[in-house]
Amino acid sequence: MAATEPATAAPPAGPGGIPRRRPRREPAARPYTRPLPVVPVRARGVTVEGADGRRYLDCTFGAGALVLGHNHPVVLEAVRRVVDSGAPLHALDLATPVRDAFTAELLATLPPAFARGAHVRFCDPAGTDAVDAALALARAATGRTGAPALTAAAHRDPAAPGRPDAPGATRVARPPHPDAYRCPSGGTEPAARRTGLPPDGPGTRSDPPAAVVVEPVQGGGVVPAPDDWLRRVRECTATRSVPLIADETLTGLGRTGAFWAVEHSGVVPDALVVSRILGGSLPLSVIVHRFALDPGGRGGHADGFRGNRPAMAAGTATLAYVRENRLAERAAVLGARLLARLRELAAAHACVGDVRGRGLVIGVELADAAAGPGGAPPPAPALAEAVRRECLDRGLIVGTGGPRSGVVRLLPPLTLTDEQAAAVLDRFADALAAVERAFTR
């Protein structure tokens, strides 16, 4: 028997049986894909074709990873050039033309006040890896350990994974992210003070944190941070010499209507974390940070998979395409149109508690309207899941998240056409009406 032959013959694995085989081979803890019984075989732009021949409009895009949609030609061509060149596909930290082109394009997209004094640091590809690496930089630069994280993302301790009580561990606190729907009277000043950083004087804290982490739009429930709140947090952190880390894993590359979401508020962070959206479908993460946070030979976060050249080429092509075609401006215009139409739907359907977002990051929170008065009604995950299923039946793929998974998330690509946007709205409206009829019988 040849060494490459299987020990026993097995019938070819057809795509029709894939959903049935998967639970026997993989654990069930896959909340993003578990409720999506689609076996994709082809995809282009916003359209996905399943093994059953059905076509879907995809408004999840790998949890928002594909700002240009599936298999965009400029991304495919960039990857092909690298693969066909014969050069190493993985070069770790070695200087290469592909790496040089990527860092140049990335810096060109940043606000000038930030780009002039910035370094680009490559990380392992997951968003948690990048935020953890940013916290490690801040800890090395400041000698401190605490870190308020006003974010929905999960972060490990980069110094001692799994041991939050270990010496030198980054103690990550989680103050509440400002939410105008659930906390309409919170105000800018109280929200800023919840970071533990009074804006004037040394305050009462004797141990300032290593950094403060914020998401300009909280990803899980799609909750935009108010611009004045972000400016106040920046003022607080600057007064206390605490680095501000902006997590733009979901919001960068034009998705919110500005190339970087922090630009809406005019805030210049000390570090910008970019992951998921950056590699044009390939895993790639970076931290862009001020020179002052560079630890030199101290505290470097030595990741093992940070030199993937096809991902860098795909990232360069994606960044350039968004910039050259002014897709951030397009996202602002189209996003405003989608939000306006969805708010009209919300006014006509009592099961919709809130519609929010910025650009093409949109959340529709389903709520228990029968809860009565007394502030915002509780989220209704059963309704959100029902809307997701009804959308899928109509050929529209959406995701859920946020409080108790009660928010339906729409994350279409920046290449969405007007006709496709109208189809998304029509299918969502039909799904919402069907769910309301079923739940009010």
Image (spheres, rainbow, N blue to C red):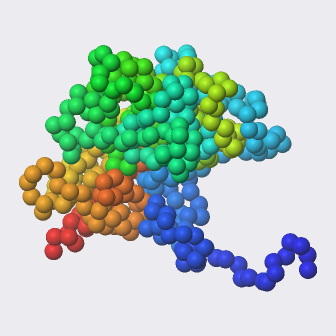
* Residue extending farthest left: 373
- Please, is residue 424 above or below residue 128 in the view? below
- Please, is residue 23 above or below residue 376 in the view? below
* Residue extending farthest front: 167
- Please, is residue 432 above or below residue 13 in the view? above
> Does residue 338 appear in the picture of this structure?
yes
Q: How many marks?
A: 0
* Residue extending farthest right: 1
Q: Between residues 426 and 397, which one lies in front from this camera angle?
A: 397
Residue at (56, 48) in percent of width and height = 161
Q: Quadrant of the N terminus?
A: bottom right
Residue at (15, 74) in percent of width and height = 441
Residue at (21, 66) in percent of width and height = 436
- Please, is residue 315 above or below residue 440 in the view? above
Residue at (62, 39) in percent of width and height = 123
> Does residue 362 appear in the picture of this structure?
no
Q: Estimate the x, y position of residue 188 in percent, counting from the top left.
A: 23, 29
Q: Estimate the x, y position of residue 146 in percent, counting from the top left.
A: 43, 35
Q: Estimate the x, y position of residue 324 in percent, counting from the top left.
A: 54, 28
Q: Give the left or right position of residue 203, taking residue 148 as reference.
A: left
- Image quadrant in which you'd find residue 392: bottom left
Q: Estimate the x, y position of residue 431 in percent, counting from the top left.
A: 30, 63
Q: Give the left or right position of residue 426, taking residue 437 as reference.
A: right
